[in-house]
Structure formats: structure tokens, C-alpha cells
């Protein structure tokens, strides 16, 4: 048996590990266990995703919680080391770019246990982002690097990573999306909010660069208010964003916007249903860029750069460098007039990535 410990920390990790764990459990050669570090510890940000993705209760819950990047990384390393000593796995599998990804990678490598990194090779070029450093450091020591798009292959080659460590397999996020698309349509979220297909926009904002200053929040208010002139707006508000609106005394202005549906974070199925029926998504999320590209939904992303360039090159994603309401207004009118590009689905984004990863790991480890 090949024993694999799958690490989940923040909410996007759950959608990536769910199809992997499902694929691993179908292979008699693999014993798969889930370690939840607790980086997202709010029930709305965590528990509901385990339930909807039909993931088992984590075999280990480290309870790390919040704190600075240093605190979260250090606590995770200390707690995960205990699990590693008890389980003695053959492989530690990490996904994405959160602090838990790097922390568990470091512990595993120092214990001479190989690491597989799913979503390896992605680079934004912005080392001011903690996620970028997590990606680079994890890829520099991982043994198996599973790639979602060609840019990942190119980046790792540029960084001198040997070809035999790199595997272009596709996107596990799309595995979850494909698997749950029909189930999402069974949710009542559109009826609950009184929405019809294409009559609304979805907005999500949570990155510190956008929501940690009153100037950023004022710009978001203006963007939402302008968008409601043309479409209803659904804003599932991230806890960080909600806290900052309160902190800067802007909550009342937000709640007063006519045509805004302000709601708590949604479950995966509900949010998937909202996305696939929206006319436009306005976001600063990484994963949403990929999901909207697959769903062929226009997406405006507030980032200076993206580690997922395929979503811009052939997908439906457009980058906006700053929170400029005038620019958003222009882009919104273009999209509503049908003047946006028709996106393509990237290679190997077919819902079968987890099976390819399982095949490769069995071939490499079952010796």
C-alpha cells in the first residue's frame, strides 16, 4: 500500500483535494488520508465544503487557525510533524499556494518524505505576494510537480527543474466543477435570491491589496453601485472584507446600495450555481479565473498579474491593474454589448486530472 497524506488548509484546497481523494480511494494500491490544518476555521468557510464535496471527516485536524503568515506557518509545521511521525506516509500531497502548502512541504522534506505538488509551476511574477513565495519554495523541493497549464511547464524549465519531475496533467479544480455541475443546478440559490440567468453579476473581493484600506473599499463600493445600474449584484462577502467594511465605518454605505444582494459566503454548490448563471464575474480570486474560463463566463480580475495566464490568453478572463470604477464601467459595457472574447477551454481541463495523477503516483511509488 502507498500511504498518502493529503493536505488541506484554506477553502480552495478542498475543491482540489476532494477529487484526488476520491480517485485515490478507488485504487487498491493507495491508502489516502486527509489532514486539515485549520487555516480556514470558520464553519461557513470550511465545514460546508467538506459536506458538499462528500469528503470524509479529516483524519487529522490541526486546529492552527489564524494569525500572521509566520505564525500560521510555524504552528502548522509543529503540529504536522506530530502527524508525520505517527503516520510515516510514503508521500505528502499538497495543493495550491497557501501557508499550509509550504509548511507541510518543509516538514515532509526534512523528514525525507517525498512531496507531490498539485498546481505546480504557476507564477505571477510578484514576489510581494506570500502565495508566490509559497509556490516557488514548494516547487524547489517537491519530487512530483503536477501542472495545470503550459506556463507551469515553461516556468519550471526556466527555474532549472528536471523534466522527469514535471507532469502536465490538467486542472483538479475543473475535476470538482465537472463532477458537481449537475448537483449545483439542484440547489435553490437562484430562487432564494429571486434571480434569473444572466440578470445579475457576482462580485467577490478578499485580497489585502484591495480590501485593507478605506480607499480600496470606497472603490469597491463605487464599482458595485455602478454595476447595479445594469444588473443586480450578488456579493458573498468574505469575513476579512466584512470586518474591514465595519472597521472603516463603510458597512452602512454598502448595505444601502439598491440592487445589491449582500450575503454570507456560499457553499461550493451554491456558488457554482451562481457562477454558471451570471452574466459577469468581478473578482480578485485566483481559482475563479479558472472556473469562469471553463464555464465561458466573462471575468474581470483585479490583479496586477496572474499566475494563471492561460485564463487571459485563451480564456474569458481580463486583468485590471487597479480598482478603477471608470475602467470597470467601460469593460462592463463592452461585455453587456457582447463585445467580449469567446473563451476556449484549456488543454486537459476535462475532469480527468485526478485519475491521471493517481496513475502516475502508482507507477512511481508502487515499486
Image: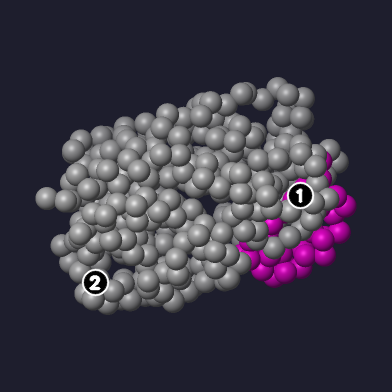
Q: Position of residue 357 (x, y in %)?
A: 31, 44
User: In the picture shown, does residue 146 fall above or below 2?
Assistant: above
The residue closer to the viewer here, 56 or 114, is 56
* Residue for badge 2: 87
Q: Residues within 10 Å of mark 2 (few under 14, many from 20)?
A: few
Query: Is residue 161 rendered magenta in the image?
Result: no
Q: Residues within 10 Å of mark 1 (few under 14, many from 20)?
A: some
- To which quarter of the image does residue 102 belong? bottom left
State the extent of the magenta-drawn residues as a range.
231-260
Residue at the image position 42 percent from the left and 69 percent from the top: 58
Check whether the beta carbons of the residues at disc 2 and disc 1 lie within 8 A of each other: no
Q: Position of residue 246 (x, y in %)?
A: 72, 69
* Residue for badge 1: 190
User: In the picture shown, does residue 295 fall above or below 358?
Assistant: above
Q: Position of residue 348 (x, y in %)?
A: 41, 32
**Quadrant of the frame with the N terminus:** bottom left
Q: Is residue 137 left or right of residue 188?
A: left
Q: Secondary structure at mark 2?
A: helix
Residue at the image position 27 percent from the left and 77 percent from the top: 82
Q: Is residue 254 visible?
A: yes
Counting every numbered tag in the picture gives: 2
The residue closer to the viewer here, 147 or 323, is 147
- To which quarter of the image does residue 223 belong? top right
User: In the picture shown, does residue 201 fall above or below 188?
Assistant: above
Query: Is residue 237 rendered magenta in the image?
Result: yes
Cα gap from disc 2 to disc 1, whole angstroms: 44 Å
Q: Position of residue 21 (x, y in %)?
A: 38, 56
Which one is earlier in the sequence, the residue at label 2 or at label 1?
Answer: 2
- To which quarter of the image does residue 124 belong? top left
Amino acid at each position: 500500500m502507498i500511504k498518502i497524506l493529503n493536505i488541506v488548509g484554506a477553502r480552495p484546497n478542498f475543491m482540489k483535494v476532494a477529487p484526488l481523494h476520491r480517485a485515490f480511494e478507488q485504487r487498491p494500491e493507495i491508502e489516502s488520508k486527509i489532514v486539515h490544518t485549520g487555516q480556514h476555521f470558520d464553519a461557513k468557510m470550511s465545514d460546508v465544503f467538506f459536506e458538499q464535496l462528500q469528503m470524509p471527516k479529516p483524519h487529522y485536524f490541526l486546529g492552527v487557525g489564524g494569525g500572521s503568515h509566520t505564525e500560521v506557518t510555524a504552528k502548522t509545521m509543529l503540529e504536522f510533524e506530530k502527524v508525520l511521525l505517527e503516520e510515516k506516509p510514503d508521500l505528502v500531497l499538497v495543493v495550491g499556494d497557501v501557508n499550509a502548502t509550504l509548511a507541510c512541504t518543509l516538514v515532509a522534506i526534512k523528514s525525507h518524505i517525498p512531496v507531490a505538488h498539485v498546481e505546480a509551476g504557476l507564477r505571477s511574477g510578484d514576489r510581494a505576494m506570500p502565495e508566490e513565495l509559497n509556490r516557488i519554495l514548494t516547487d524547489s523541493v517537491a519530487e512530483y510537480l503536477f501542472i495545470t497549464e503550459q506556463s507551469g511547464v515553461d516556468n519550471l524549465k526556466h527555474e532549472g527543474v528536471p523534466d522527469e519531475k514535471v507532469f502536465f496533467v490538467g486542472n483538479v479544480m475543473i475535476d470538482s466543477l465537472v463532477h458537481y455541475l449537475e448537483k449545483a443546478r439542484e440547489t435553490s440559490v437562484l430562487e432564494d435570491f429571486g434571480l434569473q440567468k444572466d440578470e445579475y453579476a457576482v462580485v467577490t473581493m478578499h485580497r489585502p491589496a484591495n480590501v485593507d484600506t478605506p480607499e480600496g473599499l470606497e472603490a469597491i463600493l463605487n464599482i458595485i453601485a455602478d454595476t447595479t445600474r445594469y444588473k443586480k449584484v450578488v456579493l458573498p462577502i468574505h469575513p476579512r472584507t466584512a470586518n474591514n467594511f465595519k472597521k472603516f465605518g463603510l458597512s452602512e454605505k454598502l448595505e444601502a446600495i439598491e440592487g445589491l444582494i449582500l450575503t454570507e459566503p456560499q457553499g461550493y454548490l451554491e456558488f457554482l450555481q451562481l457562477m454558471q448563471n451570471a452574466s459577469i464575474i468581478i473578482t480578485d480570486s485566483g481559482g475563479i479565473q479558472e472556473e469562469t474560463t471553463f464555464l465561458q463566463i466573462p471575468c474581470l480580475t483585479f490583479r496586477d498579474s496572474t499566475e494563471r495566464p492561460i485564463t487571459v490568453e485563451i480564456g474569458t478572463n481580463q486583468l485590471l491593474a487597479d480598482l478603477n470604477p471608470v475602467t470597470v464601467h467601460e469593460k462592463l459595457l463592452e461585455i453587456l454589448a457582447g463585445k467580449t472574447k469567446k473563451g476556449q477551454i484549456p488543454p486537459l481541463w476535462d475532469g480527468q486530472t485526478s485519475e491521471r495523477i493517481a496513475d502516475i503516483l502508482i507507477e512511481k511509488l508502487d515499486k
